Amino acid sequence: MLTAIEANYGNITKAAKMVKITPQTHYRWLKEDSDYENMTENAKDIGFRNVKDSLLELSLKMAEKGNAMVLNQMLRIFFKNTPEEMKVVSRNNNMRVRASVKWVSTPQDPRMPGYVKPTE
């Protein structure tokens, strides 16, 4: 069941179907066995990390191809929690510290200076 949970990214219903038990059996095991509960949480974490890594890899590929929307969204996610030092500076100087990217130019972007339209 633990391998199935990991393979199904934490989806208990799908994992239970995969190993031919009911989800209720899984939840009963959780109540009865604290070791199983801990191992289940670890399997879920591994599954979620695998999804996150796959999404990050795909996003980076899209950003490398010039998709500025993906890059800007990634920056918003990564800068959502401002580092503690920046928060202290912000409080002490009575000003808001934030990061934002309004536009990212890429060689494929026609708005970029020096852009040359590809010939066929």
Image: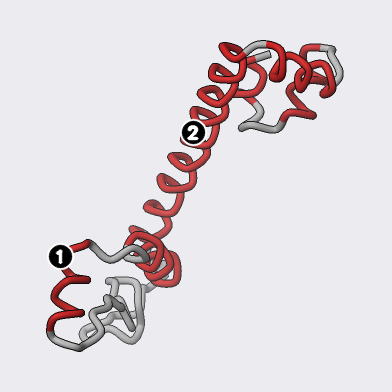
Q: Amino acid at mark 2?
A: Asn
Residue 7: x and y in percent read: 62, 23
Image position, residue 10 (x, y; %): 64, 31
Name the disc covering residue 29, or none: none
First along the sequence among labels 2 and 1: 2
Relative to 8, 95 lies left or right: left
Marks 2 and 1 close (CB-CB < 8 Å): no
- Residue 50 got which mark? 2
Task: Give the answer, above or below, for where 15 lies relative to 59.
Answer: above
Q: Secondary structure at mark 2?
A: helix
Instruction: Classify mark 2: residues with Cα within 10 Å, few (<14), some (14-19) or many (20+).
Output: some
- In which quadrant of the rendered image does the C terminus lie? bottom left
Nearer-the-camera pick, 96 or 59: 96
What residue would you read off at disc 1? 85
Which residue is found at the position 19% from the left and 88% from the top? 94
Nearest the viewer among 112 and 13 is: 13
Q: Residue at x 13, y 86 (%)?
A: 93
Q: For residue 23, which quarter of the picture?
A: top right
- Camera-nearest label, 2 or 1: 1
90 vs 78, left or right, is: left
5 displayed left or right of 22: left
Instruction: Tell which of 115 and 98 is nearer to you.
Output: 98
Instruction: Report the residue at 69% width, 19% height from top.
Output: 30
Where does the N terminus fall, quadrant-wise? top right
Element type at marker 1?
helix
Tell me which residue sits at (66%, 28%) in the image: 8
Q: CA distance from mark 2 to mark 1?
A: 30 Å
- Position of 75 relative to 22 (above/below): below
What's under tag 1, amino acid-wise?
Answer: Glu
